[in-house]
Structures are given as structure tokens and as C-alpha cells.
Amino acid sequence: MVTKTRFAPSPTGIMHIGNLRSALYEYLIARSEGGKFLLRIEDTDRERYVEGAVEAIYRTLDICGLHHDEGPDIGGPNGPYVQSERLHLYGEYADKLVESGHAYPCFCSVERLADMREDEETEFIGYDRHCRDLDPAVAARRVASGEPHVIRQKMPLEGETSFTDEVYGTITVMNKELEDQILVKSDRYPTYNFANVVDDHLMEITHVVRGSEYLSSTPKYCILYDAFGWDIPTFVHLPLIVGEDGKKLSKRHGSTSFDELLADGYLPEAIINMIAFLGWAPGEETREIFSLEELEAIFSAKGINKAPAVFAYDKLNWMNEQYIRRLPFDRWRAMVKDITDSMFGERQYNVDMLARVLQERVTKLGDIPEMIRFLTERLPYSAELFFNKRAKLDADVASVILKELRPALEALPVWDEETLSATLGRVCDEARRKKGQVMGALRVALAAQQVTPGGATETAMILGRQEALLRLAAAIDFLNGRRP
RNA sequence: GGCCCGUUGGUCAAGUGGUUAAGACACCGCCCUUUCAAGGCGGAGUCACGAGUUCAAUUCUCGUACGGGUCACCA
């Protein structure tokens, strides 16, 4: 049987990292076994439906390269792929369950249920099964008369249920612990607890991959599969992703949605690579940089860990750097230009040089504006800026050096890397000075900042002749006027 | 609280009844250098705790502690 997995998000808002990770593993399990990956929209909660959420799901999957073989947008043999379009199916199957005695209509009001929950005396252990033993004929008549009701699963009262999960192993629970959960709501929409079983079976899902928060309700689903006489699929429950404090990942940990991460300037490939390694490792292989294609080849559910994994931004940063460094220069240059064009406005600047120095230093795109603010703004000088112990440089020495440098630079016929480099080298030789000293002085004069992407030559190139010479002059003025 | 699950350095993790217990991020140091980064080299740091089984336990069993999940007409 061909492996088939599904990503089944509900359109309730943003694409959380946890959702994306589920989608990724579902995709990888299917692809690693030459199987199919399908997309199903679980929109059975009409209260939480968010406009535009479905589009965000399509967009995210597309950007990440997690292409599905069946889904609402492309169809397929097991459609429709949107649960709200499958209501008649859930109704049919719920009826079968009622007929076979595996489910029953329940007429309890939400108020009654709420009261029961608030009652401190009797420790609430789920629905009290008030309607479970109503005469089926009477119940059927009340349903026929249009009385509001839900359909509940009639759990076995004795015995135990066990299933084997690919990650967590065999899990057994006492049936008496299981609640008579609601399968169909009073608005005739199914609950997740019912729809997931019906759809996964009808859509021929072989591997049900989902977060470990579903582990405790899985026995109930197994009983449902049995009631229908359906084969139980392979379960793969995924460990949770938590924040650096060990708590469930949430807003206060930083960006936790795919869109936020993109906005921060993380590359989709890096995000995918990062979350692939959250709770999974390839085993003997120690490499950690893998493209999606490489993951498809090497991924195995065997390598999935049980313990919750902490989402570490440090590691994401490193991953992102790795991906930026490997980006083809043209693509990188375009990304940089998108950001810097608006910063420089009308001013000319050397994009190629800027992109070049940035490519080996940037952690994430969002850091760029702050990193290069000194290029579009003249920052104030201070004497300390010129101090560098290793180069034996200080403001006094810098003052002398810059004055030596100025005529040489002003006299340059062309302003290119080669000429600048050669000229600076020559000045060093003539003045018998260490390169680091001269370059350091010039770099600080041009940038007015101690740490810069790129050295003196690159900075001079990026600024262009005019701006570079103006700044050199300004630095000399500052150093002259420093001590009257 | 009941039920379920988990625990290898700060983090992600490999792995085994006998190993010097991989590797990566972060951290520290050194080298290199036209700064800082990047890169190279090196360092520190771990099997939660207590019993039991065993010639031998990080590995198997049981407890304890801690952490997490779940107990909705949400998924």
C-alpha cells in the first residue's frame, strides 16, 4: 500500500511553527517512502474561522516547497478536501454508528453541562452519560421532531484499548477513562474527534501524523475505527515544540509564526532546515545542513524523539547564516537591494560591493538596516573610535595618517577597488606604517563606527568617491579641532 | 487532581549491557586578518535521583523528583 499522509490545518489564523513542523514531517514521511501528501482543510469550527487563513496556508506551503498531491485547490480522487463540504458524509456515518449502537443522541443543554462542570462536589470526569441509556426509539423520535441534540460516542465501560505509535510505542488505557465524546455538534458539524477518523479513512491516509497533544484521545479514535470495521492507520505523534523556558511556545518567546520569521528576515529554507531538526536527527550522519530534497531522501520516522524540543533562536540564527552564505550572489544581491534602495534613496551607492561584504556577515535580513545605518547617516566622531590597541592606533596617530592619505586619495584618477587598494598599500609603504593602522584609521574615518561590514577599501567603494572624501575631510576636521 | 508521555552538557541531539559517551548551536581561548564578523584550531561542560537485576548499568525493571500533554458542542 502506498504511503499517504495529510496536513490538516484549521483555518483559524496564523501558521504557527508547530503547524509547519507537522506539515513538514507529514510531507517528508510521504516523500521518503515515495508516497502521497495531501492537504485537507478542517473548517468545522465556524466560530473560529478566520478570513484569509486558507490562502495563508497555501502560500506558506508553496514558499516552503511542501507541494501536495491532492487538496482543495488541485482536487484529487478523494475530495472534497474541505470538511465543510463533506457534511453529508459525517451525517451518514454518524447514523451508522447510532444504528449499530456505538453512538447515541444526547439532548443535554450546554447549560446543564456547564453546571455539572462547576459542581465542586462531584469531581468532573467528563460527561455523566445522562442520555446514554435513553430508549433508542424515543431518542429517534425526539431527533425526528427536530429537538436540538448532539451525537456522542458510546464508549465501552470495561476493558482496555491499546495502540502502537511509531514514536511513543504501545500505549494502553482503561476504557472507563474514556469520555463519551461528542462526534456531531448541535449545528450538525462534526467535531475533529469524528471528522478526522472518517476523513483519514475515506482519504486512505496510511500514516496519521500529528502533534502529541492528540496522543491521549487516540484510543477513542481507535474505538471508532473498530466500530466501523476499518483498519487502524499507523500513528506518528510528534513531540511538542516549546520555548527556551520549557513552556509551550508562545508570543513571549519571540516570533512563533512562519510569517513573523519571514518578516524578521529568516530564509524559508533555513526555517525548514531548522524545524526538521527539532525533535528529529538523521542518526549516524552528523551534518545538519540539509535541503528539502536531501531531507526527503534521508528522513525516517525512526529518528523522531519523544521529548519536547526547545526552539532555539541561536541555532536558527546560525542556520540562517549558513543559508545566506551559500546563496547565489545574484539572488542575495537582489534581496539586499530591496532593503537598501529605500535607505539610500536618490544617493548613488555600490550595491555589488555592499551585497558582497554583507553576505558573509549578516545573520538575518532584518538586521541589515541597523548594520549599515552609518552609510546613509553621518554619525558623530569621537576620539575613542580611533583607538585600536592591536594596530597601535589612537586619535593622534589617526590624525597624522589621515592627512597623509587625503592628497593621495583626492588625486586618484579612478575610484575602483584595485586602484584604492594599490594606493593605500603604497601609502603604507612610503610612510612605513602597518597596514592595519592605516586601514583602521581610514575605515573609522569613513564610518564613524568601530565595527563595520567590510574594511576600509570596501567602505570607500560603497560610499563612492564624493561621500568618502567628504567624510575623510570631516574626520580630519574633527581630529584637528579636538584639542584647541 | 485523574489518565498519558517524557528526562543524555545551557540548547538541539547520536549512541550502547562493557565506548576516551559522537556531532551541531551557544560559550571561552588561540590563530588568521584591512576592524568586527566569517574561517581554522583548541577548551570547558552531560547520561535527573534512589533502589533492584547483572560479573558489569547511561542503557533493563521499579520507585521518587521534575517537566509536558490531556480531561470543550477547539482543533
Image: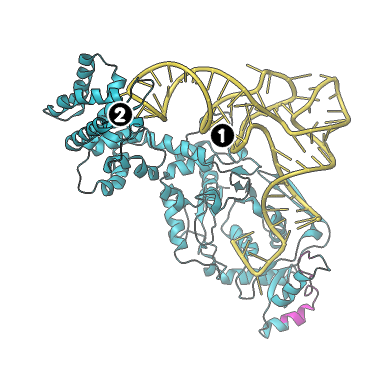
Give percent across and percent down for residue A28.
52, 44
Residue A191 or residue A402, whichever sits in front: A402
Tell me the residue that label 1 is attached to. Answer: A282
- Residue B5 image point, x, y percent: 72, 45
Q: What colour do you see for chain A? A: cyan
Classify residue A414 as left or right of residue A31.
Answer: left
What secondary structure is marked by label 1? loop
Q: Do the residues labelled 2 and 1 touch (CB within 8 Å)?
A: no
Q: Looking at the image, which is closer to me, A444 or A117?
A: A444
- The disc labelled 1 sits on which kind of residue? Pro
For residue A258, side relative to residue A426 (left or right):
right
Q: How crowded is mark 2: few (under 14 residues within 10 Å), some or many (20 or more)?
A: some
Q: Residue at x 28, y 40 (%)?
A: A375
Instruction: Give percent across and percent down for residue A133.
Output: 81, 74
Q: What distance separates the C-alpha of mark 2 from that of mark 1?
A: 40 Å
Mark 2 and mark 1 on one chain: yes
Colour seen for chain B: yellow
Q: Which residue is identified by label 2? A: A455
Answer with left or right where residue B38 lies relative to residue A144: left
**Most common secondary structure along the magenta stretch:** loop
- The picture quadrant where one finds residue A118 is bottom right
Q: Can residue A42 be seen in this view?
A: yes
Residue furthest bottom as drawn: A145
Residue A425, image quadrant? top left
Res A389 quadrant in image: top left
Q: How many numbered marks appear? A: 2
Which is nearer the N-term, disc 2 or disc 1?
A: 1
Vertical relation: A56 (above or below) A418: below
- Asked whether residue A129 is drawn in magenta, I would say yes
Mark 2: which secondary structure? loop
Q: Nearer the viewer, residue A332 or A379?
A: A379
Chain letter behind tag 1:
A
